[in-house]
Amino acid sequence: MSLRIVVTVKYVPDATGDRHFADDLTVDRDDVDGLLSELDEYAVEQALQIAEDADDAEITVLTIGPEDAKDALRKALSMGADKAIHVEDDDLHGTDAIGTSLVLAKAIEKAGYDLVISGMASTDGTMGVVPALVAERLGVPQVTLLSEVSVEDGTVKGRRDGDSASEQLEASLPAVVSVTDQSGEARYPSFKGIMAAKKKPVTAWDLSDLDIEAEEVGLEGAYTVVDSAAERPARTAGTIVKDEGEGGKQLAEFLAGQKFI
Amino acid sequence: MAEVLVYVDHVDGAVRKPTLELLTLARRIGEPVAVALGAGAADTAAALAEHGATRVLTADAPEFADYLVVPKVDALQAAYESVSPAAVLIPSSAEGKEIAARLAVRIGSGIITDAVDLEAGDEGPVATQSVFAAAFSTKSRVSKGTPVITVKPNSAAVEAAPAAGAVEALSVTFSDQATGTKITSRTPRESTGRPELTEAAIVVSGGRGVNGAENFTIIEALADSLGAAVGASRAAVDAGWYPHSNQVGQTGKSVSPQLYIASGISGAIQHRAGMQTSKTIVAVNKDAEAPIFDLVDYGVVGDLFEVVPQLTEEIKTRKG
Ligand SMILES: Cc1cc2nc3c(=O)[nH]c(=O)nc-3n(C[C@H](O)[C@H](O)[C@H](O)COP(=O)(O)OP(=O)(O)OC[C@H]3O[C@@H](n4cnc5c(N)ncnc54)[C@H](O)[C@@H]3O)c2cc1C
Ligand SMILES: Nc1ncnc2c1ncn2[C@@H]1O[C@H](COP(=O)(O)O)[C@@H](O)[C@H]1O
């Protein structure tokens, strides 16, 4: 039987752009170009490698996001994923992590899966909690933050480098995996891949397709509220000196003045 | 007064500093009740009592060490049900965030991660977060359920506030999910004898400019002269010059020390994301145009191979 892999990918504002908040204190997606979160490229890459090692596998990329989020799906398809699902609904605007995990879990169940692969964190929200939330909701093992991953005979194995130890993990499928940026460089889409992606199917679902009520998601349904967002005051310009042979000593003088020495 | 659950991060009973900081923040909201799990859990009580824990709920079982995350969620949920707290505070480690997330779904609550400050508010605790690579600072609240909040290290000063710290056994029934992900082996990270990166008062980091694993001894010598932790940029880690556990930035550790010294680091947005909230920032870089200089309190435009050893020597001389 075919190994069904669902990769969750997020469309995010470019981190090197000037990211801002909109008036309703959600992430402003208008001013900054969006792209497939770089950290989700690692998830797509591991899915491709696992699929290559399996006899028969199918990779579906799944995103929840606005119209433009199709770009993220196209990129993943051009890397080599087989098909895509785009969950889009006006009522999703402002959905928080709890709501996102609800929608992802419903969509993953509807799509059918043996293995879910996510990125370690989104580059805009940077919470790093959605994979654990999705695993909790699906009631399947979470095998997260892996820097190495493999699947064999219905078992997923991987290495998780934690704060105090490096751990080897093991779980039976179905399972939710997340991979870090240590898991291996993501491939670039080839020209052939980009052309092929144009013909790959992208299924669109809205909330009613997933039996989710509007009140459960979006800004209204959010479990958290942002009361204010303030630009951090620019750091006051510091002293910059050119080393003319005494740079180290000058720096020591500064540190002593700040009582660090 | 309402009770606040504080999840204890400890190693065989030795409480890690971020947990003591959490107790300081917890006291702004209510009476801290600590939850310590795993081997040595009861040994945490003295330190926790010293810093304000009125009660210390403890549980130990092989599941905590043998399976990933979920057994701890089961235990924290048991503590939540027995205490009915006003909030649940958890240190913002990778594991802490996952525990917090799963607990939040189970108890129907919202979750806030990576708070850098916490105050009591009319509608529940208000968390300050630093977002978009620390370009913005937001204030947020959990609006449904009992707030579950993870807090970054170095977000509050550790304060002694002696309390009873009465140890109570927590009874935990593990869920079906608890044994889903087996930890088949564990290799502890070797101690370098240097302070923990996320907890250190001073961090000394090196980047691509350090140009080789062997040259990191220059960075380490500076760090040791200041009693500092050593950090590295992703470029230095990817080149194999320094372990990934020392990476500072978006996909590494986020640090907020009193002093951050960057040498041979350009200051890319992803690196800034992990160090921009440091109190004092100092950089050595031979390129006067490097973006890191936009952040610094003091910067030296120069060759790190000249400047850093001279700095280290001068510090040693001054310290005598
Ligand atoms: C999704 C994602 C996540 C990322 N996460 C992280 C992260 O967590 N942490 C991180 O650091 N990066 C991260 N990066 C990478 C980041 O974008 C930069 O590539 C990286 O920070 C660059 O490291 P660097 O400053 O050491 O190297 P460079 O940008 O190459 O800078 C080296 C600097 O050293 C200076 N230099 C060279 N020789 C000398 C000398 N002899 N003396 C003095 N100065 C010298 C040069 O002038 C230059 O400014 C991430 C990128 C992505 C896309
Ligand atoms: N809107 C979304 N659509 C699809 N996947 C998502 C979305 N948000 C988060 N994810 C997945 O969850 C991971 C962690 O995200 P986060 O918890 O937001 O940092 C990401 O790397 C994605 O794989």
Image (tube, grey):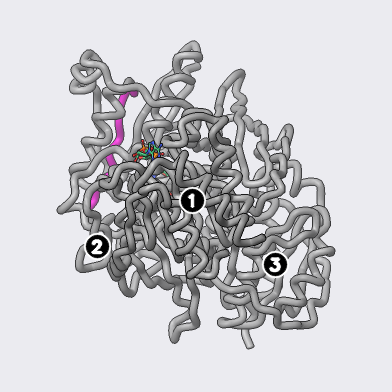
For the N terminus of chain B, the image quarter is bottom right
Tag 1 residue = A129
In three-dimensional space, the C-alpha distance between marks 1 and 2, rounded to whole angstroms, equals 21 Å
Residue A85: say if magenta. Answer: yes
Task: Please determine if labels 3 and 2 lie on a single subunit.
Answer: no
Q: Which residue is mark 3?
A: B79
Q: Which mark is residue A21?
A: 2
Q: Residue at x 20, y 68 (%)?
A: A23
Residue B68 in percent (x, y) is at 66, 44
- Residue at position x 55%, y 55% from top? B314
Asked if residue B185 lies in the magenta stretch, the reply is: no
Q: Is residue B314 left or right of residue A217?
A: right
Q: Residue B229: image x %, image y %? A: 59, 51
- Which image quadrant for residue B92? bottom right
Q: Nearer the viewer, mark 1 or mark 2?
A: 2
- Label 1 near ligand 2 (CB < 8 Å): yes
Is residue A16 among the parts visible in the rendering? yes
**Magenta span covers which residues?**
A81-89
| Chain to which mark 1 belongs | A
